[in-house]
Amino acid sequence: MDFINDYGLPKQTHEIFAIMARGHFISSNGTKDNMGRLYDIINQPENFEKLQNYFNVIRYNIERGSNYFYFSKINEPNSVIEKKLETFERYVDIIDLFASMDNKITIGARIRPSEIAEECIANVRLKQKLQKIPLYRSETLVNKVREICELLARDSFLELEDEDSETYKVLDAYNYLLEVMNAISIYEDTENNTDNSGIIYN
Amino acid sequence: MALQVNIHDILTQLYVNREVVEYLFAHRDNISANQLVAATSISTEQYQKLISLELIYEYEGMVFLNDAVIALFEDFMEIGEVTPGLIQDLLSELRRQMRYYQEVHEIRFLRGIKKYLKRIHSTISREIIKLQKNVDETYKNEANFRIKLQKLEAYREKRDLILDFIKNTEEILEECRKIFMLSNDAELYNIILMLKAGLIENMDYLIEIQTDITDFINKIQYQLDVYVKVQQLKEIKDQGNLYFRTNFRQVVEGLKPLRLNGIRGPRTRIAVDFLYTDEGHALSKKFAEKYKISRMMLRGLAGKLPDNFKEKLIDRQIKLDVSNLVDKFLAQNQKDLFLFIMETKFPKSAGEITFEDRLSLFVEIAMEHEKKLEFQYTLAPYEYEYNGEKRKLKYTVILPAKIQKRQPLTVNW
């Protein structure tokens, strides 16, 4: 631990590395693993600079988002592109489901799979959306929503706040998904293309 | 409350029940009696006593800490709901005290003025800190987005209210400058200076809070806007045009997070030296079990060497002092090697030499001292007892080599 003192790095450096090197985000409103505190530590300008320089040596780069941080790899070509596209196609489905719900899921929201499933059962449009999301478990709607939540929690966009009531908290990292979606441009229709004139946006 | 006997009693009760008080304060929103009992070491009797003391109260199965206690802690910790009305009350009181002082220049009213000026200063600062915390907390943790927006709007109003009070305070200070001059009181002068500096600082904080609130509201609005966009993307996706009508591929390809790029954390390997340790062996065993590697599973740890293993080695050397035995054999010419070994009486120090031991000795000598021996290539029978029954074996007759009888070689040139 001496080298940490020598470089003036925060003593939580290895915790920060352990989380981010696994590909997880550190969100300001996360509570597990002391995450909120870790966010504050990285967010302090003097710490940020030191940590950035330190991690850059081993080719990790801290990326800053809206109230969250994550790692990227320097000079590493992006791989598994097909998998990435597939993942994000599924995120389009999932976020579209969340967007169509009555209580919009935003940062800090608490969600329970059972509640979402109930809303989906009550609303035919939502139910269809949910059923069409390609997932492994499809026996019941609750299980399907549960799998969605587990998937998002695994990628650190959600956090299982209370296991007993199965309550998930939406973390700041969820903004990352929204930012990616927002970055996608929709090309304008050409004048001769009349096929899409009937699109109804909700 | 029944607790309100005197400060000493209040403090004692809070101290004695600090575990419960702390737990209830942390879970002041909703906690049931059962949860409280499970989480703390409180007994049923103690629980009833706390209710009778009105330190806690129960409603529909839920337990709550006395509001006065909550307010006390919240004040200390500068958390809780923002209450700008308090500043208004203090301002009214200040005005009243100043009117009194204008009527009669008595020190007691001057003391009142000082007290309220100090309180206004601390209250404004505290309310602003609470406002800042609440705005942040609401944005990050409020579950329902509609409520979140409403709450943020409410905080914006409160922020405006505090701003008005700050302006009112400045006005009062300006209006009554003469009175303050008249009093010629150094302490009052200092308090006013501090208050003025504090007001300027607080104005800055309020501007920051205003920016935060606007920023948060915009972020929520942004999230809602993105949702509309995602719905459009979904429509396009359902039509199979996601890759043709949007730059989905380009955007997703360029994403950097490790997880999306299949990077699963640092790649490390187990040090080979570690595998030689006991822990390493246990790990290898687990690994072998997982992958059904039976060879590794069979090979266990070697047993511990006996403490006296060195002594035993020496024993063995004495017992098998073969060269001495061979010399003795070579010096006689009555018996062949087999019979010689079978009939030799070994010293007691060598311990018991079994038939098998003698057989091994025979083979060993035959192999290692081949040059000193003469192999007859004839078999002789030998009878012996094995587990009480008589058995027969045939052995090769081996005699001492008759080197001395051979003529030395002569070389003719």
Image: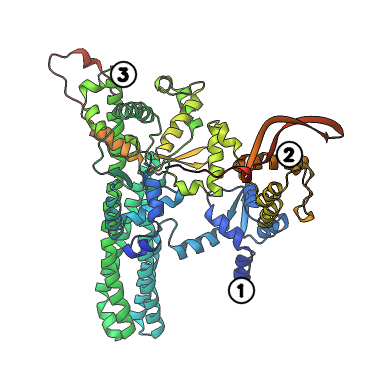
The CA span between labels 2 and 3 is: 97 Å
Residue under numbered circle 1: B8
Question: Which of pointers 3 and 1 lies earlier in the amino acid sequence?
Answer: 1
Q: Determine the image quadrant of residue A155.
A: top left
Specify few, some or many for label 1: CA neighbours under 10 Å numbering under 14, 14-19, or 20 or more: few
Locate the N terminus of chain B by quadrant.
bottom right
Q: Does label 2 or label 3 sit earlier along the sequence? A: 3
Asked whether disc 2 touches disc 1, contact meaning CB atoms under 8 Å apart, the reply is no
* Discs 3/1, front: 3
> Residue A181 placed where, x, y %?
28, 32
The label nearer to you, 2 versus 1, is: 2
- Badge 1: chain ID: B
Q: Is residue A29 visible?
A: no
Callout 3 amino acid = Asp
Which quadrant: the C terminus of chain B? top left
Which residue is more in the foreground, A50 or A41?
A: A50
Q: Amino acid at mark 1?
A: His
Determine which residue is flagged by label 3.
B238
Percent x, y of residue B132: 35, 56
Callout 1: SS: helix
Q: Which residue is mark 2?
A: B338
**Disc 2: host chain:** B
Q: Can you give x and y, in whole percent of width and height, for residue B254 in the image?
A: 24, 35
Q: Nearer the viewer, mark 2 or mark 3?
A: 2
Depth order, front residue of B103/B349 = B349
Which residue corresponds to the image point at 59% horizontal and 70% vertical from the top-left? Answer: B11
Q: CA distance from mark 2 to mark 1?
A: 106 Å
Model colouring: rainbow
